[in-house]
Image: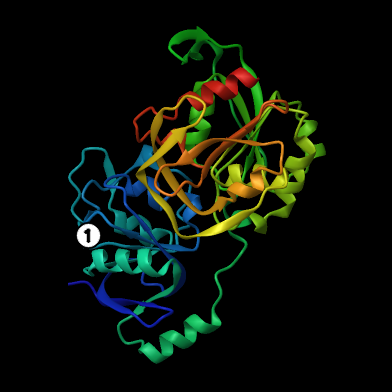
Amino acid sequence: MSKKRKLITETGQEYIGYGFGSGASRVCELVFNTSMAGYQEIVSDPSYTYQAIVMSYPLIGNYGMAEDDYESEFLSAGALIVHEYNDIPSNFRSINTLSEVMEKYDVPGLYGIDTRKLVRFIRNNGSCKALITDETTTLEESLKILEKTSIPTDAVSKVSCSNAWKSRVILSQAAQAVGTKPVIVKKKHIVAIDCGMKKNIVSSLNAMGLDVTIVPWNTDSEAIKKLHPDGIFVSNGPGNPEDVPETIATIKKLIGEYPIFGICLGHQLISLAYGAKTYKLKFGHRGGNHPVKNLLTGKIEITSQNHSYAVDTESVKNTPLEVTHINILDNTVEGVRCVNDRVMSVQYHPESAPGPRDGSYLFGEFLKLL
């Protein structure tokens, strides 16, 4: 039997279970994800930096970890909390157990607790700080630790690349479907600002026939212009968009110079660069089945989402941006564009393909802007 461990929220709730992964004690922001599959992509998504992820689906670990399914080179999630953990995966592609990988990257796990109760707590009370620790740590000690420990605000710099790198495609492989007609796209070059970029986004851009130069989050506009891009991509990433004013300043200087496409955090940063405002959601959007309405077509898209912040609807009205997508569940902004500046962005993740291809057209739309 695994060692007993527990989770304590900043408001004093205790959940006692068993540990897997790393045995580290960790203070994280407590969030939940409603996806029924994809735990490898979730736990390796840089957007979960400093967050303890509660999986609402009860069984996690049963298909192990496959070499080709990681969204980043390393795990930066704060912790993973599940109801039932399976340490004997049944999958011919699996090369490691989830626990082995979490231990390698010092990510603590907790299983054997009532995750339904915990998800309801987060939903009703909002995201909060929580401590993953040993069973012997008292409630009084835990609350003191939580009181004096703040969630760091350097998440983007922690997960962004340190140096620029390239991901190229072979022109003969760039025959892609734009809309409904297969075409051979002309090879172009874009610069992607890495705020915690998922691997699958790079793959999706390459699949459109785009050579991609990935640059660190704090690369200035002059350095980007010297790379002579045909367009700019602003990636997803963790944390509060207002914590990266350097990236916002860079985007401001690139607007109107190049076509720009942003996803998730990139959507928020583009909106801030135009003068809109963002705010923190009560418990965020995390899952693979969020319905989004495309206001340009009237169609409903099933989307994958992972974010704590949203763009303020009223603030968009005072900018050159127009809202293109809204969330059906809470009417939050899910997409914006500026036709004159050739700028577009969405809050959700089209590369995750939960629909399965409801949002893939967006890469084609970006290609048209180029």
Query: In the rendering, at what x and y percent does residue 64 appear?
Result: 26, 48
| Quadrant location, the C terminus | top right
Task: Kindly identify which residue carries mark 1.
Answer: 85
Residue 162 makes an appearance in the image: no
On the image, which quarter does residue 92 sit in? top left
Give the SS element for disc 1.
strand
Task: Work out whether 324 lies above or below 308.
Answer: above
| Quadrant location, the N terminus | bottom left
Task: Work out whether 143 lies above or below 206.
Answer: below
Query: In the rendering, at what x and y percent does residue 343 appear?
Result: 66, 31
As shown in the figure, which amino acid type bears the numbered disc 1? Tyr
Residue 12 makes an appearance in the image: yes
> Which residue is more in the foreground, 331 or 370?
331
Query: In the rendering, at what x and y percent does residue 35 appear?
Result: 31, 48
Residue pictured at 32% horizontal, 87% vertical: 136
Count residues near mark 1 (Cα–Cα under 10 Å), then give few for <14, some for 14-19, many for 20+.
many
On the image, which quarter does residue 128 sit in? bottom left
Task: Work out whether 109 lies above or below 137.
Answer: above
Query: In the rendering, at what x and y percent does residue 192 appear?
Result: 63, 36
